[in-house]
Image: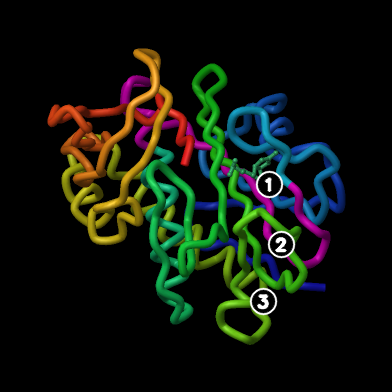
């Protein structure tokens, strides 16, 4: 069928069906740069235990395994790096994408891609689900696809190659080069200037997003006039 050629530094394996590519990579804990693509997932997972639905043949669902040399405390930055990498890859297809902090990719305010980063032992597993050629998406999900936005079909193999290219550069920037990554992320920050309600360990917080902090945190101006820096792994968007 398609040509799943891997860009330099990556090795791609394709399976017809699996429960979840993230689960498989967590079970196998493969070497750095291994990519698992599933044509169909029977139990695809999203963040916070959500289900990730994708119709076979119209979506791109895959996971990459990395063995980062940076300390584990920096690994949450991989989520930011991945959202940015996907947005930049879509830019190469002529599609302007924004990143909804921390790592959803949006087109015209609707979600086109979700990212799930998990760690097991020395391996960071980055799972990516992208709506490529879908035309019928479930109502009420506020989701879209490349095809809906661009009005044409895309080769999933080409899209994967472009993402892996950008992913290699951006995931290499979670250490000393992180400021450059953050600068690029700020240019694509969907939430900037928007009023949000978030759940954090200290309770619900409402405010206007000022942007992204130097450490990749969400900068929020609260109703009480306080500035808060929120970490990606401790907040949950309510609206
Ligand atoms: C989210 O938006 O909540 C994250 C969705 C992540 C979905 C991808 S699809 C490939 C990989 N395998 C999974 O089970 N989940 C991720």
Q: Is residue 69 among what the camera can see?
A: no
Q: Which residues are magenta?
A: 53-77
Which badge, 3 or 2, comes first in the chain's sequence?
Answer: 2
Cβ atoms under marks 2 and 1 closer than 8 Å: no
The CA span between labels 3 and 2 is: 10 Å
Question: Which corner quadrant of the image does residue 91 belong to?
Answer: bottom left
Is 86 placed above or below 44 here?
below
Q: Residue at x 61, y 60 (%)?
A: 143
**How did the renderer colour the structure?**
rainbow
The CA span between labels 1 and 3 is: 17 Å
| Residue denoted by label 3 | 155
Picture coordinates of residue 173, whole percent (x, y): 28, 44
Q: Is the CB–ligand 1 distance for label 3 below 8 Å? A: no
- Residues packed near mark 1 inside 10 Å, few (<14), some (14 to 19) or many (20 plus): many
Picture coordinates of residue 6, whole percent (x, y): 58, 61
The CA span between labels 2 and 1 is: 14 Å
Near-viewer residue (224 or 199): 224
Is the N terminus in the top left, top right, bottom left or bottom right quadrant? bottom right
Q: Residue at x 38, y 31 (%)?
A: 232
Element on which disc 3 rests: loop
Is 136 placed above or below 78 here?
below
Element on which disc 2 rests: strand
**Residue 71 among those drawn in magenta:** yes
| Residue denoted by label 2 | 59
| Residue denoted by label 1 | 36
Which badge, 1 or 3, comes first in the chain's sequence?
Answer: 1
- Extreme residue in the front direction: 224
Residue 157 in the figure: left or right of residue 239: right
- Extreme residue in the bottom direction: 152
Q: Is residue 71 among what the camera can see?
A: yes
């Amino acid at each position: 069928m398609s040509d799943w050629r891997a860009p330099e530094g990556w090795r791609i394996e394709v399976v017809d069906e699996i429960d979840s590519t993230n689960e498989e990579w967590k079970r196998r804990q493969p070497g750095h740069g291994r990519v698992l693509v599933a044509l169909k997932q029977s139990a695809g997972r999203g963040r916070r235990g959500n289900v990730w639905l994708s119709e076979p043949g119209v979506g791109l669902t895959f996971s990459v395994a990395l063995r980062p040399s940076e300390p584990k405390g920096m690994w949450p930055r991989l989520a930011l790096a991945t959202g940015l990498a996907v947005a930049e890859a879509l830019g190469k297809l002529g599609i302007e994408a924004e990143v909804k902090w921390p790592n959803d990719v949006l087109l015209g305010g609707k979600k086109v891609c979700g990212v799930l980063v998990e760690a097991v032992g020395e391996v960071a597993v980055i799972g990516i689900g992208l709506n490529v050629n879908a035309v019928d998406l479930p109502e009420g999900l506020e989701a879209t696809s490349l095809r809906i936005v661009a009005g044409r079909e895309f080769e999933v193999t080409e899209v994967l190659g472009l993402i892996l290219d950008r992913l290699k550069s951006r995931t290499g920037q979670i250490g000393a080069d992180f400021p450059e990554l953050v600068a690029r992320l700020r240019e694509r920050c969907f939430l900037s200037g928007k009023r949000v309600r978030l759940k954090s360990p200290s309770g619900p917080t409402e405010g206007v997003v000022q942007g992204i902090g130097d450490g990749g945190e969400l900068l929020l101006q609260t109703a009480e006039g306080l500035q808060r820096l929120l970490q990606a792994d401790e907040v949950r968007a309510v609206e």
